[in-house]
Structures are given as C-alpha cells and as structure tokens.
Image (spheres, grey):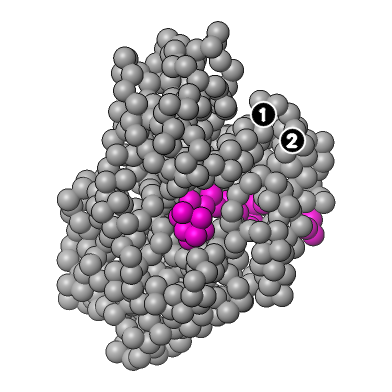
Amino acid sequence: SPDSPWWRDAVIYQIYPRSWSDSDGDGIGDLPGITARLPYLRDLGVDAVWLSPFYVSPMNDAGYDVADYRDIDPRFGTLHDAEVLIDTAHALGLKVLVDLVPNHTSSEHEWFRAALAAEPGSPERARYIFREGAGPHGDLPPNNWRSVFGGRGWSRVPDPDGTPGQWYLHIFDTTQPDVNWENEEVRAEYDDILRFWLDRGVDGFRVDVAHGLVKDQTFPDTTGSMHTAENAPGHRMPMWDQDGVHDIYRRWRRILDEYTVPGDPDSERILCAEAWVQPEEALARYVRPDEMHQAFNFEFLDTRWDPAGYRHVITESYRSNDAVGAPTTWVLSNHDVLRHATRLAVAQEGYRPNGIGADDPQPDPELGLRRARAATTMMLALPGGAYVYQGEELGLPEHTTMPDEWRQDPIFHRTKGTDEFALGRDGCRVPMAWAKDEPSLGFGPSAKTWLPQPEAYAALAVDQQDGVPGSTLSLYRDLLAYRRKHRFGHGALAWHELDGPEALAFTNTSGDGTRTVLCLTNFGDEPASLPNGDVIISSGPLDDGRVPTDTTVWLRLPTGHDR
Ligand code: ISL
C-alpha cells in the first residue's frame, strides 16, 4: 500500500567511500567527493545509499577496524562533512544508511589500549574476550578457533609487567579484537553509538557480521572451517548465529522505533543484517517483526548461473520471510565478493576471497557482462528490496590482474605463503570510473588512486554510457524507473511454467495493480520464445523477437492477466 514503509521495496546503493569519488586528489575517496556526486544517484533512481565505514581507523581492514565510532577518519573528512552529506542526500530525496561494526573494534580503539594496560580480570579486559592459554605455560591458544582471514583466531599479549600473558579472540584480523557482548557496559556503549548517528539524521544501519556477536560461552573446539556455517546447513559453529544475538537486535529495534514519527512510515529508521547464515529459516529469524528490517539474501548472490538454483532460492526465501512478514533483500555484489560481472562467467561461489589472479584462466568479460545484466534484470523484477554495489550499474568487472604489490586486503597478507593462501578482495574495491579521458578516470582531480584501475574500466566510464541506449547504465536507469513507477517491489510473484527447463520465468503483478509483467531469463543455448505481450525492457538485444541465451526480458502481458 502507498503508506507501506519506504524500506520494504527500496533499492539501496552501496558506496565504498574509499573508492567512489575523491575531492582532493590524494587518491582516496572522501565525503565531500560523495556529496558532490549524489545527484548522479538521484538520477540513477535509487532510494537510499549505504556507506561502508568512514570512521577513524588505522585501515588494517579498510575501515572495518573502527578506532572511534563517533568521528570521521581524516582521510574521508570531518563530522561536519558527514552532516552535509546526510542533509544533501535528504534534500535530494535519498535516505542514508551507515555501517555499524559491532563485532570487533580496532586494536587502536581506546578500549583495547586500556585493556592491554590493565590486569587480567579487570573491567577493561572484560569488554573483550581474554582467556588464559592452554598447555602448562599457557602458551597454546585457548581453543582451536581460526580467523576468517586465515591463521589463528587468538593472539597472546603481555601482562602489564611485560611477562607473557592472556590471549584475546579475533575472528577477523589480529587488529580486530572481538568485543564481549555478554558485558552490559558493551551493550550500553553501542546503544549510545546508535543514538549518536540517529541524532545526526541517518536513516539506518547495515550491521556488520550480524551473525557473529554472541559466542557459545563454553568456547568449544570447532570441527570444520570457519565457513562451515555457511556451507553446511545444520552445522552451527560456536561463533556464528547463536540464539543470543537476537536479544541484541530486539534491544536495538526499540531504540530505532523511538525515532519513528507515529503515522509516518517514511520516518522509519532501519537495520539491515549482514548475516552469512543458512538455511533461509535461520536468516529469516533476523527479520522477525521486533528485530531487524532487512537481511541480505546471500544465497541468491552465491547461486551459480543455473535456473533451478535461482528458483529454489527465490521460493525458499519468500516462504521463510513471508512466515515472519518481512520482505526479501536481494543483492548480487558487494565489497567482499567477486563482482558479479566476473563471477557469473565462472562457476564460483560469491564469497571466494581467493579471487581470480593474473595467472588463472581469465573469465570471458563479454559472457560475464551479459549474465550480469540478465541477473540484475531478474533481480529488480523480484518483490522486496535490493542493494546495488557501486559500479555494477556500469558493468564493471573484477580487477583480476592487479599486481600483488598493490594488494591491501589483510586476507592476502595473512595467508601469503600458507596453505590457506587467498588473493583477497581488492579486485572489487577499485576506484570508480567516471570519465574516460580524465586522470584516474575522473575518480579525483589527480592521477592518484589507492588501488590501480584496470584498462577495461575506461570504456565503461559513466561518461561513455550516460544517455547511450543499450548501455548498462541506461539499463539500470530504465529498470529502476519502471520498477518504482509501478511499485514492482510491492508486487506479487507467481511462477510461470515454460516448456523447456532452460529458462526461468515468473510474473510480477505490480504493487499499483495496473499491470502484470513476465520476467523471463534464458539460461539455455537456444533462443526462447515469448508469449504475447509488449517487451518493456530487455537486458540485451532480442533475436527475431525471441530471447537469446543469457538474456532477461520484461514483457507486459495483455490486460487479461492484470488483477
Ligand atoms: O563470517 C564469514 C565466514 O564465515 C564471512 O563471510 C564474514 O561474514 C564476512 O567476511 C564479514 O564481512 C564483513 O566484516 C568483515 C569485513 O572485512 C568485511 O569487509 C565486512 O563486510 C570484518 O569486519
């Protein structure tokens, strides 16, 4: 209905601040750079932006290692710049979500410095997860937990007197100590951080590692890898998806709801879970009515180019989410996974920090782009909300030939020379391409970029696609405009059975009740024919009225189909 909350069908654009727009030419994107280019996003037709972390940080994990949650890193700007950004976005009709990183702080956070200076057993240490080591001298880690980034999940620190002391848990980098969510002082602190940003007008938070905050307090040894929770439904790891996390989100939801103006669904502030959790029922628990609003559907992102796989994920997600009254939140790319314009050309899962290196067989860029466009055209026909990662609207591929000396991801550095070796995520974090003939492709006023841009980006720059019929940018604009106009995010999905198994088709009867659109994706080798109707949008050229392979079409069915 028209008074349904804004977020239920929103399309939200993820900005990676370091790589979107650089106003001062230091090669690092910044907040004034973002503010200056917000009109581009209004014209693209998205409803909101989510900004990856911009807080004070030593940048060991690109800002996901926060040293001060209430201030901006000087590389990105000032608190005043953030306020200007939020106000400018609102004036353009765009909501703003920020990233909340509650699983860990930076080791440079004042709390962790205080913990290192304090005795074992002190209140300062109780904000983190310190334990005595195993073995006669405590020189073995307390248990066998690994880090997601490779290596041990525990590191040992000296006691204040300099002798070897306790171990602290870090599920990610050694510079990202896990916070102890059993501690009420910790809970109160993050309540206050939420309020700090809500008071500055943000419309919500994307919650980092939402499945990881609460640990099994018996700290049992694990069997299986850190990724087992994602890959083997039914096998729950002691650091992922523990029941206790849901209490935290109920508490936060009450805080966010205090900021809602009664009777004004447009004023709702939201939480979006980054939770790599399976099966869909487990993920849906994060979006129960008194918890978060959205949770990324990573199973959709992880689906290989296969009609049965997509149909299964879509069906299961609606089944699980309908049961709790939540929309599904679709996503194909983000700053942690291979860009889908590359990923869909290879049979790979989304979360593959091992990436593709210069020495690996290089995926076919044309195939990848065709599939990326088809996948997005399918995604944006689905009821629910969706996230778009910066640059995917240009069809940007992963940078797969980046020389190693540029790589910054701790995954690369921690695993180098070990049998866990992985290239890391730098290839999807490369600065944006705005203008073909400018230095740094228009990213900033100088030629400097913190990561190198691949050659292929020049021809894909915004100024090469803007207003060009058939370009990927034009496709996104068309999809978003039509979707918004007829409220397809609020529509009703029904599967449409076809003769062959190689295509996937569903109808979406629009939320404004005016039309039924058939969305057909052809995964097979032979062109697929279409029923009667008007082609509204196609992800690629048609072949004599038929849908070629790796192409998605939106077709408006004759009115008899409309409700
Ligand atoms: O937990 C995982 C494996 O079981 C990962 O998928 C994990 O959930 C994911 O890496 C979390 O990512 C987020 O937190 C990281 C940060 O490096 C990423 O950029 C961020 O998106 C640590 O803050």
Based on the displayed image, in which of its 4 quarters is residue 282 positioned?
Answer: bottom left
Give the vertical position of 536 relative to 160 (above or below). Answer: above
Tell whether 366 sits left or right of 435.
left
The magenta span reads 1-28
The numbered mark at residue 488 is: none
Query: Is residue 10 on the magenta stretch?
Result: yes
Depth check: 369 or 513 in front?
513
Residue 28 appears in the figure: no
Q: Amino acid at mark 1?
A: Ser
Q: Residue at x 50, y 44 (%)?
A: 512
Of the residues under marks 1 and 2, which one precedes in the sequence?
2
- Please rate how many residues cluster around mark 1, counting C-alpha atoms within 10 Å: few if below 14, some from 14 to 19, many from 20: many
Tell me which corner region of the image, top left, top right, bottom left or bottom right, holds residue 442. Answer: top right
Q: Residue at x 61, y 41 (%)?
A: 481
Q: Give the number of the disc on residue 471.
A: 1
Give the number of marks.
Answer: 2
Are the two marked residues, 1 and 2, in contact with CB atoms closer than 8 angstroms? Answer: yes
Residue with the mark numbered 2: 466
Q: Amino acid at mark 2?
A: Asp
Quick one: 521 or 373, which is closer to the camera? 521
Q: Is residue 116 left or right of residue 479?
A: left
Q: For this rendering, which residue is in front, 378 or 455?
A: 378
Pinpoint residue 205: horizontal percent, then vertical percent. Answer: 49, 66
